[in-house]
Image (cartoon, rainbow, N blue to C red):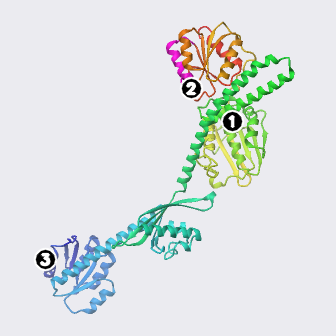
Amino acid sequence: MRSIARGTILAVDDEPDILVALEDLFEDEYRVLTTSRPAEALELIAAEPDIDVILSDQRMPGLTGDALLARAREISDAQAILLTGYADISAVVSALNRGGITGYVTKPWDPALLRSAVRGAYERHRLARELATERALLRGLLDHAGDAIAFKDTEGRFLRLNARMAERLGAPSVEACLGHSEAAFLSPEDAAAAAAADHAAIASGAPTETVVGTGPEAAQTWNQVTRVPIRDAAGAVVHLAVIARDITEQRLLEARLRQADKMQALGTLAGGVAHDFNNLLTAILGSLELALPKVAGDARLSRLMTNAAQAAQRGAALTKRLLTFSHRRDLQARVVDLNAVIRGMDDLLGRSLGGFVQVEHSLSPDLWPAKVDPDQLELAILNLCINGRDAMPEGGVVALSTRNETVTGSADPNLKDGDYAVIAIRDTGTGIPPEILGRVFEPFFTTKGVGQGTGLGLAMVFGLVQQSGGTIRIDSEVGRGTTVLLYLPRSREAVEATPASKAAPAPAPRRARILVVDDDPQVRHVTASFLNGFGYDEVEVPSGEAALERLATERFDLVVADLAMPGMSGLDLAEAVRRRWPALPFLLVTGHAEAARIPADFAVLEKPFPSADLAARVATLLAPGT
C-alpha cells in the first residue's frame, strides 16, 4: 500500500478534551496543530502556509466554526471540515454557501469515518496544489519563453498558447485563437501545410521537427517547428504540443558565412590566377622590352609593340589589385595624394561598374595629403562604388569628390577635432531605410539578398579608415541615394613619390656568374636574357633540385630563383643555400609575394618587373659589403 505523505492538520475546538482526542486520532499520520481559540486559529493559518486540512467545531465562543472557516478561506487554500455536535444543518449549509468547507462530520464521530474524511480532504488539497503548481509552471513557460508555444487537440484546435504564437499567427489575441486551428488565421496553403505536419506527428507518435519559411523572399522569416505528441494514461495520443523557434537570424548568418567561405575560396583562386598571370606578364613585358631595341628603325612596329607593352602594364596593375583583394595584409601606409589615387582608378572603375553607370569626379585641387595604404584605399573606394552600382539597377551616377574639412566640436565620438581630407562617394540609387542605416557597418550585415553580398565590404572599409586614424559617415535617403564620407587625417608630411623604375638598366658593376632558377621556361629565358644584356654570365636551371646540383660543382656569385616552384620552392632553396653557402647572395622573384611567409631579411623582387628593377637589385646584391 502506498504510504501517505505526512501533512499538517489544524484542529480548532473550545473543548480541550476534544482537541486531545483529535490529536491522538491523527498524530500517527499527520502533524497536528491545535488551538481552542478561533482568533489564534486565524493567526496560525496565516503563519503556517502548509496547513492541508482544518478541522473546526461549529459552536465556539466569539466566532462560530462556519464564520472561522469562511475567513480562513481568504488566506489559505486548506481543505476545511466542520465538526458539529448538533444537527445544525443550517450552519452546515451556511458554511457550504460561503465556500468555507468541503465536508462536515457530526459529533460524536466515527473514527474510521473521520479518518476517511480527513484523508480525502488531504488528498484533494495535495492534488489541487500540484495542479496549481503545474498551471503556474505552464503559464510561466508560455508567458516568458522566447519561442511560440501552443497545445492542440487531435483536430488541430488550440487549447492553450502564448502571445508569441498568437502574434506568429497574426491573431488579435490569445483568446481569439482558442478553439480554432491555423485555418482561421493563415493562408490556405500555410494552414494545409501545418495541418499535414500535425497529422504526421500524431500518426508517428514521436516528436518531429520541420523548418518553415514564411513571407516574401526579400523579408522571409524562418521558424524551426517542433511537434510533440502527448499521450493519455492508456497510451493514446490526445494532444499535441507545438513549439516554433525563430531561426531567421541563424539562417541568414549561416548563409552569409557560406558566402564568406565562397569569397575566401574566390580570393585563394584569385591569388593563384594572379600568380600565373604575373608569370605571363613577365614573359610578355620582358620579351617586348628585349625586342623593342631591335625594331627601333621601324616606327609602325615600334608603336605597336609599345602599345602592347602599355596594355601589359595595365594588366599588371589590375593583377596587383586582384592580389590585394585575394589576401588582406597589414596596412602599408604612406603619405599619398588622394586625388591621384582616385584618378588612377579610372580604368578599374570603368570596367567594374559597367556601361550603365556614369562615373563623375569633383576633386579639390588643393586637397591635403593623408597617410594611408593606397592599395587598401583603392579597394575601399572600389567596394563603395560597386555598392552604389548595385543600388542603381537601372543605371545612374556614381560621383567621387574630395574636399578639405576642419572639424571642431563634432558630436561623433569617432571624429576628433582636427584637419581632414574627405573623400565622398555618392550614388543616385534606392537609398537605405533609416531602421537599418545604423547597422550597415556590422560584419555580415547586408541589405542585399542571400548570395548577393557577404556583409563584409563596408565593415572592411570601416576598419581601414579607423586603422588610418579617421572615420566614416554615411547619409542616405530612400529613393534619393546614398553618400559615404571617408575622413582621413591630414598629414603634415610631404607626399611620398612612388618609386619609379630607372629609364635604363644599370650596367654590371663587375663580371659575375648568376644562376637563374625558374620552372617556367619563358620567364626563365626573359630573366636570363636581361642578365646577359647587363653583362653577366647566366646559367639557367628549371628546379631547386637542379640548382643545388649545379651549386655543388660550380661557383656562382648570385642565385635568382622563382618563389613558387613544384617540389622545392624558391624559399626552400634559399634556406638550403643559406645553410650551405651562407655568403652567396640570393634573390627571390615572385608573382605573389604574400603567398608565403618570406623572412624580412630575404631579398624579394615582384613580378612583372622591368629590366631596370632587376638590374638595380642584382647590382645591390653584388656590391662589395652587401
Report the amino acid beneath label 3.
Asp
Say if mark 2 contacts mark 1, CB within 8 Å: no
Q: Magenta stretch: dominant SS?
A: helix
Question: What residue is at 76 percent from the left and 39 percent from the top?
Answer: 350
Question: What residue is at 70 percent from the left and 9 percent from the top?
Answer: 535
Residue 374 in view here:
no
Residue 407 vs 512, above or below: the answer is below
Residue 427: say if magenta.
no
Residue 109 vs 590, above or below: the answer is below
Q: Earlier in the sequence, mark 2 or mark 3?
A: 3
Magenta-tinted stretch = 567-584
Disc 1 marks which residue? Answer: 378
Label 2 – label 1 distance at C-alpha? 33 Å
Residue 391 position in % (x across, y down):
71, 50
Question: Which mark identifies residue 24?
Answer: 3
Label 1 – label 3 distance at C-alpha? 96 Å
Q: Earlier in the sequence, mark 2 or mark 1?
A: 1
State which quadrant residue 414 falls in. top right
